[in-house]
Image (cartoon, rainbow, N blue to C red):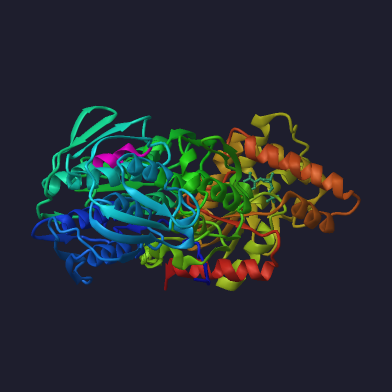
């Protein structure tokens, strides 16, 4: 598989009710139980994806008869009952961990020779624990490739069962496989866990599905499962939407200030990954649990430490969300995801780092120190891991130029992922319903002024330079020799000064177009802008200014956060400090590049740490790194994003 998908930032909130496909985990468990049952089962809400197709083909080769209705996502499965006699058969599990680890303990219970294999990716994943447990039960298994890995040849001749010990530290799938196979063993099976298993909710899911198909599982204590020999009976089962797949849409709502509802998931849901919304809630999102739905609404996202041992498939989703958080996020308890489809911890580190996120690997997870100013587009390697592709695409909702390489790898569990995400793209807002304000914020040297002016021309809209207002007050103060260290005097001046800004900037009737850019004005303006009373006077004037002219392109430091937090389009322009310094250096005479750089650093610090309306990335805004771009290219992209947001 090859190709690249370039993500287009949404430029507004993700809102909607995505059509999330059925749970992979439940589908593959139910499919196997139905295939082993005596009679016909009906499964609805089934996932059709590579991992479940692998299980489907496998159970057909064992003799199950299946009627597939892809359109209605349902299956009718006529099970094989107790008949597990096969001649020489070969089973290709493709890249499916569940298919291979569920089938291996089942196959040994039959009679005949089986070769079980999978893709190169699956061949590189561990099977040691399960092989060891099955050998302890006297099963004959030969690894024909590397030890502890697929391919494996099974000489099946039934299993007596009894008692077995197994570790669940690497994967709960080994235990789930033994549980699912246990009723086929002559004496049933008692499974003793030698440690606390990872992903415990998946074991609960296995037990639940086995119960659905008529098999009881006793749990006398935390580390013991007891299953008697028995026969699966058919069941009509409705598969829940996949909670891991839903995590991407909940995250999309959280990071774009949107609202996403997923029907079919609820508190009593059998999937542990529904707990991901509890994590989002702790970060600051609003979560509403319905009787048969979960809704997540975006809000400012704080930091925190989260142990995802039980819901590790959402670790990559959280890592992407963390890039937009206000403070540090630590994800722990997930060391074992190094042996999933790829080394997922390594993938989080390398791919988020490419996008400007500071990530540190720990022994059992990652620490992410977000700095939204530094986010930038990148070409994302997906390592043939569906979850890398889906999680990293979330960055592209707000950061231009995120491209996902080999996007087709999502087919493993969610073939339609990108089109379902695309359907949630915000629709254009009619101009009759909203003021068409494009809010453009960013630090000095980010290209804000040049871009905002050119964008206004391109869109044929008025341009508002709010910085010029603060500068005009500074000019008035200089002219009238008002004491700059007297905040009340400066505020009084802001109240009375007459400012007109169009082609030229007129202060108290006198042209000040050049004066507002003088060295003295440059110096004084940050003091003026940091004065809360001045802001209280100028911000309403800025709102009135844009409202009277029917909207436009408004640039400043607090447009998306304070002046128009509901602007239909919000952008934060950034650029490398070095690049910004070089740009400013071209425009200023008499300073060295280092002087300019130090001055920018100081201004960034003052602007972003002042108490009143500090310069920050507005929630949900597009974060656009302009370091390597021409003004024309930035304007063209912003114009396109803006046009998608308005109708008419
Ligand atoms: O963008 P500029 O350099 O012309 O801005 C002048 C000053 O005003 C600068 O210190 C940032 C401040 N400013 C602000 O605080 N809020 C705005 N909306 C615009 C500018």
Above or below, comparing residue 139 to residue 165 in the picture: below
- Examine the structure image and report whether residue 390 is included in the region drawn in magenta: no
- Examine the structure image and report whether residue 200 is included in the region drawn in magenta: yes
Compare residues 146 and 444 and report the one nearer the observer. Answer: 146
| Magenta stretch: helix, strand or loop mostly | helix
- Which quadrant of the structure image shows residue 447? bottom right
The image shows residue 445 at horizontal and vertical percentages of: 72, 53
Residue at image location 45% in from the left, 44% down from the top:
315
Q: Is residue 451 left or right of residue 90?
A: right
Above or below, comparing residue 294 to residue 37 in the picture: above
Compare residues 128 and 321 and report the one nearer the observer. Answer: 128
Above or below, comparing residue 280 to residue 543 in the picture: above
Residue 387: tell me if it is visible.
yes
Compare residues 583 and 488 and report the one nearer the observer. Answer: 583
Residue at image location 62% in from the left, 68% down from the top:
635
Which residues lie in the magenta part?
198-205
Image quadrant occupied by the C terminus: bottom left
Q: Is residue 322 left or right of residue 595?
A: left
- Which quadrant of the structure image shows residue 358? top right
The image shows residue 89 at horizontal and vertical percentages of: 30, 66
Residue at image location 70% in from the left, 67% down from the top:
630
The image shows residue 108 at horizontal and vertical percentages of: 28, 52
Determine the residue located farthest toward the top in the rendered image.
221
The image shows residue 172 at horizontal and vertical percentages of: 35, 41
């Amino acid at each position: 598989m090859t190709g690249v998908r370039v993500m287009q930032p949404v430029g507004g909130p993700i809102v909607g009710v995505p059509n999330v496909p059925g749970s992979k985990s439940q589908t593959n468990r139910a499919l196997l139980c139905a295939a082993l049952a005596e009679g016909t089962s009906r499964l609805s809400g089934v996932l059709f994806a590579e991992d479940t197709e692998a299980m489907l083909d496998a159970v057909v080769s064992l003799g199950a008869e299946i009627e597939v209705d892809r359109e209605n996502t349902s299956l009718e499965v006529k099970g094989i009952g107790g008949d597990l006699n096969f001649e020489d058969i070969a089973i290709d599990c493709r890249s499916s961990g569940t298919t291979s680890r569920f089938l291996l303990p089942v196959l040994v219970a039959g009679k005949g020779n089986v070769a079980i294999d999978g893709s190169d990716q699956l061949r590189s994943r561990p099977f040691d624990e399960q092989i060891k447990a099955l050998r302890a039960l006297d099963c004959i298994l030969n690894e024909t490739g590397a030890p502890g890995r697929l391919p494996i040849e099974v000489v099946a001749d039934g299993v007596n069962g009894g008692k077995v010990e197994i570790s669940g530290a690497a994967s709960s799938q080994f235990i789930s496989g033994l549980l699912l196979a246990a009723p086929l063993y002559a004496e049933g099976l008692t499974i003793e866990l030698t440690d606390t298993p990872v992903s415990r909710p998946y074991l609960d899911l296995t037990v639940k599905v086995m119960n659905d198909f008529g098999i009881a599982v006793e749990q006398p204590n935390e580390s013991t499962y007891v299953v008697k020999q028995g026969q699966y009976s058919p069941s009509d089962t409705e598969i829940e939407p996949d909670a891991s797949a839903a995590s991407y849409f909940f995250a999309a709502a959280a990071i774009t200030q949107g609202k996403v509802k997923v029907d079919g998931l609820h508190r009593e849901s059998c999937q542990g990954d529904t707990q991901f919304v509890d994590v989002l809630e702790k970060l600051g999102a609003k979560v509403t649990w319905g009787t048969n739905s979960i809704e997540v609404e975006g809000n400012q996202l704080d930091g925190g430490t989260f142990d995802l041992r039980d819901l590790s498939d959402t670790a990559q989703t959280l890592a992407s969300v963390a890039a937009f958080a206000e403070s540090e996020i630590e994800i722990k308890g997930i060391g074992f995801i190094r042996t999933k489809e790829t080394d997922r911890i390594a993938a989080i580190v390398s791919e988020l780092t490419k996008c400007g996120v500071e990530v540190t690997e720990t022994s059992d997870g990652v620490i992410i120190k977000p700095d939204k100013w530094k986010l930038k587009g990148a070409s994302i390697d997906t390592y043939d891991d569906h979850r890398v592709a889906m999680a990293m695409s979330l960055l592209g909702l707000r950061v231009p130029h995120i491209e996902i390489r080999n996007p087709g790898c999502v087919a493993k569990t969610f073939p339609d992922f990108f089109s379902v995400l695309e359907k949630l793209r915000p629709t254009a807002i009619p101009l009759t319903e909203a003021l068409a304000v494009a809010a453009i914020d960013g630090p000095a040297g980010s290209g804000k002024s040049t871009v905002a002016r050119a964008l206004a021309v391109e869109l044929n809209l008025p341009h508002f330079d709010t910085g010029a207002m603060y500068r005009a007050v500074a000019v008035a103060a200089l002219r009238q020799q008002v004491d700059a260290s007297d905040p009340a005097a400066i505020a009084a001046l802001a109240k009375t000064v007459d400012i007109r800004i169009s082609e030229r900037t007129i202060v108290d009737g006198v042209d000040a177009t050049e004066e507002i850019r003088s060295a003295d004005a440059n110096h004084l303006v940050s003091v003026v802008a940091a004065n809360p009373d001045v802001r209280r006077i100028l911000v309403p004037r800025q709102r009135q200014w844009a409202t009277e002219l029917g909207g436009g392109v408004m640039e400043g430091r607090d447009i998306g956060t304070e002046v128009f937090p509901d602007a239909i389009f919000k952008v934060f322009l950034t650029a490398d400090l070095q690049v910004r310094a070089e740009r400013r250096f071209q425009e200023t005479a008499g300073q060295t590049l280092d002087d300019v750089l130090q001055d920018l650093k100081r201004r960034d610090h003052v602007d972003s740490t002042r108490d009143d309306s500090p310069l920050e990335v507005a929630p949900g805004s597009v974060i656009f790194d302009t370091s390597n771009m021409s003004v024309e290219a930035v304007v063209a992209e912003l114009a396109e994003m803006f046009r998608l947001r308005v109708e008419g």
